[in-house]
Image (spheres, helix red, strand yellow):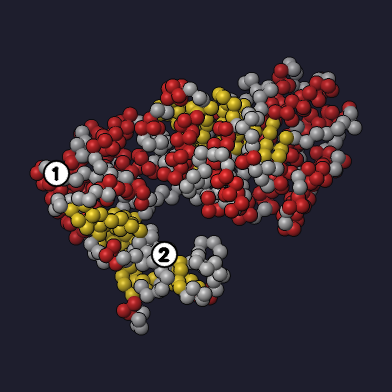
Amino acid sequence: MITFNDFIREKGLFSILKDLYDITSLSENQEDLLLLVFNKIMNTEFDDSTPNHIDLIGDIYEKTVDLEYRKNFGEFYTPRVIVNHILESIGYTYNNIIRHKKIIDISCGAGSFLIVSSKTLKKSLLISYQNQELKDISIETVKKILAEIRNNIFGIDLNPIACILCQLNLFLSVFDIIRVIYEKEPNYQLECFNIKNINALSLSNEEEYDYIVGNPPYLFIRDITRQHRQMIEKSNLETNIGQYDYYQIFIEIGLNILKDHGSLGYIIPDSILALSNRRIIRKYVYEHSKIREICIVGSQFEDPVVSNVILILKKEKDGNKRMENLISIKEMNGDRHSTRELNQKLIEKFDFKFQIYLNAIDVKIIDHLNENFPKLGNLMNDASYHIILSRGIELGKGGKIVYCQVCQKYFPIPKKELICPVCRNLINLESLETIITDEIPLEGGLDYQKFLFSMNRYKVNEIKYINIKKNGINYKNNRLYKDRIIIRQLNQNKLICATYDSNLLTSQSFYNLRILKSDIKEFNNYYLLGLINSHLLSYYYCKTFSSYKKLFPRILIEKIKNLPIKVPQTEHEKKCSREIISLVKKILMNPDDLINSENQINSLVFDLYEISEEKRRYISQEFKVS
């Protein structure tokens, strides 16, 4: 019986595929890499009974190719549980009507989705012939089954190596059919699958598909090559504006080539849910599809910073049907799934954020806060006040800097290449130094100021010293650090973490917030600190900005500007404000004894924001407060 490896050798399949995809454009290293992967494939025994058999060729590629190389293509190969979930959610299953329906993965990689799709379609076709044994079907029918699979499974990828591997994977997925054909017709002319080595931007809207699936590349705009950025910017797209991510372009392209009422299923970063830069793609999705499912899956790939969601869409032109749609909200946890529903029409209400953890009580509370209280950003633009909000010194927490001999300036150490951000010349690593120290040096003491190194709520934990005389470092205006609120980027037990200080310098990991002018003396920095550290505003933050985030949640400056702020106006409100100010000062004097004072502040803030007793209890449960 012919094996898959024998089949590859006898048919010269590797040479056919190398000719099909122009590998002359590959660098010498890439050609060597392709040869190395192929040799490993040829030394592997393939068997359909292999446990979790889905993408063995892709597995070989992943184990052979360095992660950093694959990240340059945005390549993260998809676990089987995700592939199965997406295909089931879009209805691409053998017991549904999938014959003569076209499915495409426009970033197919080695073909994880297409492998399972081909096996699913094969099973569906065998059932339709009322016999699941290939040996009992006529050879002409077997050839028709293979042709129908080939004519309805499509894939594209920018990486020619990925296309070659995908072809091999697809041949392997239907090798039982191929074997039957070749045993009876050894001279059968083999045709390759519809896997094209093209850019997804070149797809025509005239050719539509019933299903779109995939794991689009995770590349932020700064990581996309200049050539591809230019192609994106010249394309007839609506979402290629601002600080976009490559995956959002793939969502728009997918919806464009999808038939009416066709289904799309992607696994993408969870940044789509609430990040302001992703508003344009959320609005596009809202206006072109029924959002059938959002499933939180957490980190599924090798890069631990990426946390993911599965997005299932159904193309729908009828606006009324879109508004009536109920979004299924799921959370994948091992074999268990928790499911809730959210009205799609609520998305527009929340400025096109996918607020997936809001229930009816949350909606009422957030509506109340949004409709009755100005945002901090609005107050910053109000001439009645002068409020400043800024990050600290543009410097990493460790204080590492390098020196450019050409510009004769210092810069924070670059994250990637050691290249000067101004003149683009290489920087000598020997110029690396640290400007944050535990103690002031014996010489040059006047060049150092106190520097906040770590903090908790209402408390400065650790102080170091920073050299303030390094030409080129953006230290910011010194008045920024006077008598102000400091907000840490990372929350503390789901609570916003802020304190007060009069002179410590900070890095960009902290925000500095200061009221410079207010005609209402009760609206001052101490009062504002009490509001920001309150459970109510932390609840608002969690529910509107960060509730979806499973890994490394950060408080962004744009989110601080969106916090609802109560400015005391009446005598009663001013009295509450004075009590908050007194309690905040008390905590700052003794931050290790704050529970009772914090409870009093929370109660006063609830009063100021007119939160009912029932809703207070509900909010308190979020933070496990009795």
At which x and y percent is residue 139?
Answer: 84, 23
| 125 to the left or right of 10 | left
Label 1 sits on residue: 569
Amino acid type of disc 2?
A: Leu
Which residue shows up at 61% across the image and 51% down it? 227
- Could you tell me which secondary element the residue under label 2 belongs to? loop
Q: Position of residue 536 (x, y in %)?
A: 26, 42
Residue 33 in the figure: left or right of residue 202:
right
Q: Earlier in the sequence, mark 1 or mark 2?
A: 2
Quadrant in the picture for residue 116? top right
**In the rendered image of this protein, does residue 21 appear above or below residue 396?**
above
Would you call the spot at circle 1 few (<14 residues within 10 Å), some (14-19), or many (20 or more)?
few
3D distance between C-alphas at marks 1 and 2 = 40 Å
From what the image shows, is residue 286 above or below residue 423? above
Q: Is residue 462 visible?
A: no
Specify the quadrant of the image occupied by residue 52.
top right
The C terminus - image quarter: top left
- Eyeballing the image, is 392 above or below 72? below
| Circle 2 residue | 395
Q: Which amino acid type is shown beneath numbered disc 1?
A: Gln
User: Could you tell me if residue 234 is visible in this image?
Assistant: yes
- At a point 19% along the width and 56% down the height, the residue shown is 517
